[in-house]
């Protein structure tokens, strides 16, 4: 038996962790959100279906815990995580690796930035301040999501799939 948590446990970590650490913000935006990294870790360990379940369940649980179930930000996290999971599963296929997983965690974070900017009516394209340093929340969120992914994989190591 491999030493890794079930998708339900990942939903609990994603939802409760996001709710507890949401007060940590940069420019009013929460930085530590477990939804995208844990959804992709679930897709890495299991299948894309479990990753989408972790994305939706984690966002729903965080929304209930924060009393903001109608918050657009949590919906965009769930949507960005689900799209990143499906893209990761279709691109990586059976040759999943930690390097590909990290790349899709960063891409999922960028997708969240795009969806959040679109909702705010700021731009339909990526804004340069997300990448040039005038919006530090984006860069910090990418680094934190990568660190969360590596931390989860170091706590519950799983052998890389070679097929």
Image: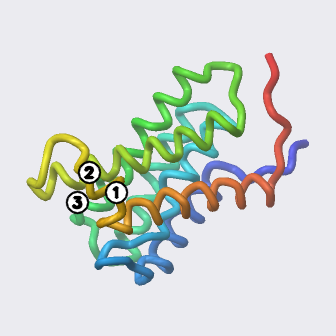
User: In the rendered structure, which disc, 3 or 1, sits on the residue that comes first in sequence?
Assistant: 3
Residue 82 horizontal/vertical position (percent): 42, 40
Question: Is 96 situated above or below 114?
Answer: above
Q: Quadrant of the C terminus?
A: top right
Q: Is residue 126 left or right of residue 154?
A: left
* Residue indicated by mark 2: 128
Q: Residue at x 9, y 54 (%)?
A: 121
Q: Quadrant of the N terminus?
A: top right
Q: Nearer the viewer, residue 54 or 132?
A: 132
Q: Could you give the CA–CA distance between mark 3 and mark 1, rounded to whole angstroms?
A: 25 Å
* Tag in front: 3 or 1: 1
Q: Residue at x 44, y 81 (%)?
A: 24
Residue 155 horizontal/vertical position (percent): 80, 60
Q: Nearer the viewer, residue 121 or 159?
A: 121
Q: Nearer the viewer, residue 160 or 106?
A: 106
Residue 41 horizontal/vertical position (percent): 63, 45
Labelled pair 2, 1 in contact (Cβ < 8 Å): yes
Question: Is 155 situated above or below 118?
Answer: below
**Residues packed near mark 2 inside 10 Å, few (<14), some (14 to 19) or many (20 plus):** few
Label 1: state its secondary structure. helix
Q: Could you give the CA–CA distance between mark 2 and mark 1, rounded to whole angstroms?
A: 6 Å
Label 3: state its secondary structure. helix
Q: Is residue 70 left or right of residue 93?
A: left
Label 2: state its secondary structure. loop
- Give the colour scheme shown: rainbow
* Residue indicated by mark 3: 72
- Residue farthest toward the top in the current orientation of the protein: 163
Q: Nearer the viewer, residue 148 or 58?
A: 148
* Residue indicated by mark 1: 132
- Residue farthest toward the front in the current orientation of the protein: 132
Question: Is 146 situated above or below 140?
Answer: above
């Amino acid at each position: 038996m491999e030493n890794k948590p079930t998708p339900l446990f990942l939903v609990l970590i994603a939802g409760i962790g996001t709710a507890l650490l949401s007060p940590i913000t940069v420019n009013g935006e929460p930085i530590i959100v477990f939804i995208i990294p844990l959804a992709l870790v679930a897709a890495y360990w299991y299948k894309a279906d479990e990753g989408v379940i972790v994305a939706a369940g984690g966002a729903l649980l965080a929304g209930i815990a924060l009393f903001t179930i109608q918050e657009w930000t949590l919906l965009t996290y769930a949507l960005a995580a689900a799209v990143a999971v499906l893209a990761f599963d279709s691109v990586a296929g059976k040759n999943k690796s930690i390097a590909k997983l990290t790349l899709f965690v960063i891409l999922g974070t960028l997708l969240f930035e795009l969806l959040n900017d679109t909702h705010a009516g700021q731009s339909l394209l990526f804004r340069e301040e997300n990448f040039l340093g005038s919006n530090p929340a984006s860069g910090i969120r990418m680094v934190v999501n990568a660190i969360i992914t590596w931390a989860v994989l170091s706590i519950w190591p799983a052998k890389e799939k070679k097929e």
